[in-house]
Image (tube, rainbow, N blue to C red):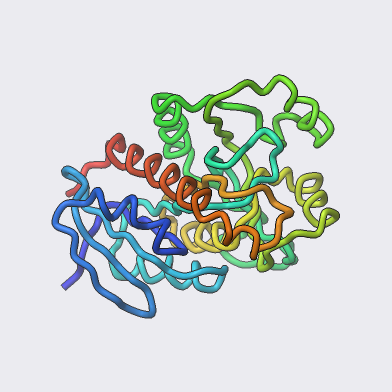
Amino acid sequence: METHHRIAVLCALPQEAEPIVEALQGAERSRRYGTDLVTGQLGDVPVVVCVGGMGKVAAGAAAQMLICEYHPEALIFSGIAGSLNPLLEVGDIVIGQSLVYLETNNDIIAECDPFLHTYASDGRLCTLACQVLDRQGYRRVPSLAEMGDVAAAGAAVADNGSGRRYVCGMIATSDQFNTDPDVLDRTRRVWHGDCEEMEGAAAAHVCAKNRVPFLAVRAMSNRCGEAYEDLNRHQSDMTLAACNAGAAVLAVLRAAQIHHE
């Protein structure tokens, strides 16, 4: 018997999923294919939340499992990331308008379906996410692509103002927790990456291959450049970021006008 859940939410870590899981009514937990799953309702919206694990392979496998087993009408990735855009501080958000693999020959990958070098979030879901963040009091600031170059981004910091911020920009997905300044600078310069993480492009790739609308929401837990061990010593920043991303995703779920048949 097929199970139909209108929206699937994929996270890498339990702490990224919990703000969403806590809001579900009638939550039921299970474990399948090496992932932790929670199904429930958010109002009239059936939701399945999956903790798929860290890294591109884990994210791609979990995304395909969700699509095959739950037939979602959309899949949202919610989680934390490291900021590359100097306008973004801990707790600020990147809506992944586009996502790209680092350390990968994207020309070769693009020879196969879905024949893409980068992977886009669904335009309607991106617009909805931006509207939600506007209502939550976030202020939209330029992405690196909108600013044109890193020097302009650095200059913009001086008059950035206060309050929570978000961009609709590029998410860079890496197999590494990169700290090398040259590597990070290249990601900003070549790809205009506003943040870096380890799963998003893989989930977006699988969704594009299956023609399932996708959205990535990442909140900043740190600035790229610090060591992974240092990040683990700032659990409060990780918790804040996970909660901010989760709150944004919950607001998108509540606002989404997708009618379940």
In the picture, measured across the screen, residue 109 lies left or right of residue 32, that is right
Answer above or below: position of 196 versus 134.
Answer: below
Where residue 153 sits, quadrant-wise, is top right
Q: Nearer the viewer, residue 207 or 36?
A: 36
Q: Nearer the viewer, residue 182 or 58?
A: 182
Which of the image's four quarters has the N terminus? bottom left
Where residue 163 sits, quadrant-wise, is top right
Q: Residue furthest bottom?
A: 33
- Residue at figure coordinates x 41%, y 59% from the top left: 15
In the picture, measured across the screen, residue 224 lies left or right of residue 204, that is right
* Residue 185, x across and y down, in percent: 81, 49
- Residue at figure coordinates x 26%, y 54% from the top left: 47
- Residue at figure coordinates x 37%, y 41% from the top left: 247
- Residue at figure coordinates x 29%, y 70% from the top left: 69
Where residue 181 sits, quadrant-wise, is bottom right
* Residue 115, x across and y down, in percent: 62, 59
Answer above or below: position of 188 versus 149.
Answer: below
